[in-house]
Image (cartoon, rainbow, N blue to C red):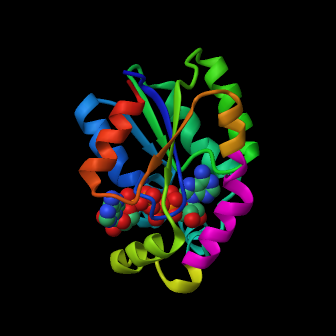
Amino acid sequence: MKNKLLFLGPPGAGKGTQANLLCEKYGLAHLSTGDLLRDEVSSGSVLGAKAAEVMNKGELVSDELVLSIVEGRLENINKGWLLDGFPRNVNQANSLKNLLEKINQPLEAVILIKIPDDFLIKRLLARGREDDNKQVITNRLKIYREKTSPLIDLYTNQGILEGIDGNADIDVVFSCIEKALG
Ligand code: AP5
């Protein structure tokens, strides 16, 4: 199975849910920039406090901060890995490309989890994380469309993107992902 992976998709698509299942079953390292940033926030650091301000508005934290979080971790993994929530714009995608060239581990597959907006808004409101309120969700979606969705064409053109219907039961979505990864 392909094991150098990236999950793309709007907020609430199920990236984290599916990433946890896949990483547990196949022993992959799960690198979620959202989770890592939330850990930084919980640590009470100055950096975390700055990140929280941005996250609670549904904006993207600086590329510099995210890259510093990903870089060291990715370099030290000697098994398969799954990136969840990174890259989130073209600049981050270019940085990832350079980093992967440096460590000689090319990206093998990008899974795009697709789901209509009204379903994901319902899911997120039901979850109720700090950034899951109507106004912030609307902004997260806007940012996704403006900044992250251009990556769909980027990876489609590289021939490594597979689209999956995320609007189904969790185990059904999981089977589709496994199938797509061969
Ligand atoms: P991040 O944590 O990455 O949030 P997100 O992309 O908005 O994604 P979510 O975690 O909301 O959704 P998900 O797709 O993972 O769905 P999940 O499985 O949780 O980022 C948060 C913030 O951090 C960003 O806004 C930004 O500020 C910052 N950030 C992170 N990365 C960054 C980066 N690279 N650059 C700059 N800033 C960055 O599922 C959602 C809910 O739906 C759950 O309750 C789940 O139980 C449920 N669910 C899942 N699948 C199903 C299903 N099939 N059926 C029914 N319910 C389901």
Residue 104, placed above or below residue 49: above
The percent position of residue 128, horizontal first and vertical second, equals 37, 79
What residue do we see at 53% from left, 24% from top?
A: 108
Foreground pick, 85 / 121? 121
Q: How many marks?
A: 0
| Magenta highlight range | 137-151
Foreground pick, 90 / 41? 90
The percent position of residue 104, horizontal first and vertical second, equals 59, 14
What residue do we see at 44% from left, 36% from top?
A: 82
The quadrant in which the N terminus is found is top left
Foreground pick, 104 / 4? 4
The percent position of residue 57, horizontal first and vertical second, equals 61, 77
| Image side of residue 111 versus residue 50, left or right | left
Task: Please say whether residue 148 is one of the residues in the magenta stretch.
Answer: yes
| Image side of residue 63 versus residue 8, left or right | right
The quadrant in which the C terminus is found is top left
- Residue 94, can we see it? yes
| Image side of residue 117 versus residue 97, left or right | left
* Image quarter of residue 77: top left
What residue do we see at 62% from left, 45% from top?
A: 87
What residue do we see at 31% from left, 37% from top?
A: 23
Q: Main secondary structure of the magenta part?
A: helix
- Residue 40, can we see it? no
Residue 23, placed above or below residue 135: above
* Image quarter of residue 94: top right
The percent position of residue 8, horizontal first and vertical second, equals 54, 48
Residue that sits furthest to the top in the current view: 104
